Image (cartoon, rainbow, N blue to C red):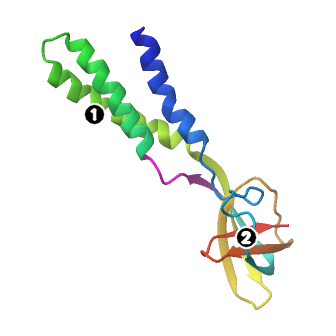
Amino acid sequence: MKLGFYMGMLLFPLALGACSIMPSSNTYTTAQAGTLQEVKFGTVVGLRNVMIREDNAETGKVAGGVIGGVAGNDLGEGKGQIIGSVAGAVIGGTVGIALDRSIQSKEGVEITVKLEDNRTVAIAQLADEHFTIGEQVKILTSQDGKARITH
């Protein structure tokens, strides 16, 4: 019974991490859909592979701390429960942070574009679309300053 509980708690951050939406050329959130965006055109002059990591690394830390604290408390069986809980929470939190980073890191691409007005800009986004140097692209910028590059 306890093992099932621990496994469920361990998978909790995985489920939450899967709900995150990272910057992409092909994906819009419901808040982004239907919003006015400024359009600029340019030519791809540089490409660089990058990793994009979700900013919210608290989910795994908290879940890992709870799992570790409960496990440490149970291991103490009435003797040294506080020390076991604290040690378990610290270890669990550290494991949770590592889980969060691995779950929420995705392959991305930094695309450098020379705009029609001769300015050069770079945008990092998920590598969900293939771009090549010399290709004409469109940059969509929303009112909150977030941008994406598409074909």
Dot 2 or dot 1: first in sequence order is: 2
Q: Which mark is residue 46?
A: 2
In the image, residue 52 lies in the stretch drawn in magenta: yes
Q: Is residue 97 above or below residue 112?
A: above
Q: What x and y, as percent, mark residue 40?
A: 78, 81
In the image, residue 113 lies in the stretch drawn in magenta: no
Q: Which residue is mark 1?
A: 90
Q: What x and y, as percent, mark residue 124?
A: 64, 64
SS at circle 1: helix
SS at circle 2: strand
Q: Is residue 18 above or below residue 43?
A: above
Query: Looking at the image, which residue is at 17% across and 19% down?
Result: 81
Q: Quadrant of the N terminus?
A: top left
Q: CA distance from mark 2 to mark 1?
A: 43 Å
Q: Nearer the viewer, mark 2 or mark 1?
A: 1
Say which of 72 and 115 sits in front: 72
Say which of 132 and 96 sits in front: 96
Q: Is residue 141 above or below residue 91?
A: below
Check disc 1: other Cα within 10 Å, few if <14, some if 14-19, many if 20+.
Answer: some
Q: Is residue 24 left or right of residue 145?
A: right
In magenta, the rendered stretch is 50-57
